[in-house]
Image (spheres, rainbow, N blue to C red):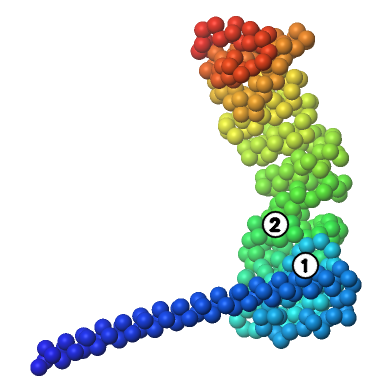
Amino acid sequence: MQEQIIIIAITSVIALLVLLIAAVFGASVIRRGYHERKYRALDRLRESYRIKLQGALEAGEVKSREGEFAAPARSLRWQAIEDVLLRLLSGPGHHAEVKRLFSSLGYAAFYQERISRRNTQTRAMSIDKLGKMKDSSSVPKLISLLDDPKPEIVSVAARSLCKMESPSGLEAVVERLPRLVGEAKVSAKTMEAELLNAGAELIPCLKKQTHLFDNPRVAAIILAVLAQRPADPWVVEVATGQLASENPEVRSKALQVLGGQEHRLRFPDLSDSISPLLEDPVWWVRLQAVRSLHAIECPGSIDALERLLFDEKWQVRNEAARALLALGECSLDALLKVLSGPDRYAKDSICEEIESTNYHVRLMELLAGEDGALREKARRILELMYKLGFSTPHGEYLVDGANDAVKSELWTILKQPAGAL
């Protein structure tokens, strides 16, 4: 009797589990089917309203047809219209009218109300939406959230304010940078990424807050952002002044600014400010100094770059070799001097960069040139490369090259004993 009761109990439990699994599976199938129908309907509505909104905007009829785009909050129509407006705002043209629609159709007010909710996820999502909508009426509310105790709220508020093309909002973010970064409310990398979204208001805003450069962590963030901005005399002045900072990261970021393409085109005499950093005690500052001089392509830096071919860090050696090669024929004497010397690491760095940058192509062109001095220097470099075991370009040219004079010179080099150095 007892055994029968146990069997019945086990059977009942198994049956219950089977029913539970079936119920969960059934609910999953129903939920999946519901969402599929919902998203199909949403896609149809998006396409429909995209056509209507674009047509109204292009015809200048948005105000007269505004009633067509009103919908109950959180309905599928509401969501579809919001998605279309956000896409239009991220594209070219009609920005002012699209932003006005976000306000007049109730989206801005809806999300402004939700940022005061208790749920952190709801608040963060609403703040993000307001930032994407670039709603100017939301700026004061978002500024107040920069003082929120929750880091995730502060982070998304800062991101939204940087997107909103509002001088007051951007200024509020910038003036709080020391506290935001110092208290780890926003990471340095995140803050850097958000300030890159800021528009033309950034430079005027920073000019009002020059004391921020007294904080090394903040200075490094700002300089990293300025390195991606268009050329500006004030930016060059600030970056040059930061080259003397005691913080190596700040010095490195300042070098990035001065070595940027925009700045080197408008301010060609920057090499005088950059060159002293080639002797910096911190290796990665030296590396950035070489990269900046490489970008500027300053012939006056050949001697300093030659010294760095013997740097203790291979990264600096390789970058110095690459910078020398970028200077062209005026650096051939320096290359020959190092390739003829005793330091194998320095010699290998040069040979590797000659191959990786395809500079050997230029050397082979010089073999057939009319300048006898350049022709002899090129031949000597190619000969030293061969003796150091870097002969792949020589063999490839003998197979695929078109100039018989160059081939003849290369045959002469390859007839010599290899590995003689």
Occupied quadrant, residue 7? bottom left
- Tell which of 200 and 407 is nearer to you: 407
Occupied quadrant, residue 57? bottom right
Q: Is residue 389 left or right of residue 10?
A: right
From the image, tell me which residue sits under label 1.
Answer: 88
Is residue 187 visible in this depiction of the protein? yes
Is residue 215 visible in this depiction of the protein? no
State whether residue 14 is above or below residue 212. Answer: below
Mark 1 crowd level (few <14, some 14–19, many ≥20, 10 Å Cα) = some
List x then y, in percent, for residue 116. 68, 83
List x then y, in percent, for residue 307. 66, 25
Q: Residue at x 88, y 75 (%)?
A: 61
List x then y, in percent, for residue 238. 81, 48
Mark 2 crowd level (few <14, some 14–19, many ≥20, 10 Å Cα) = some
- Tell which of 118 and 372 is nearer to you: 372
From the image, tell me which residue sits under label 2.
Answer: 192
- Three-letter code, disc 2: Glu
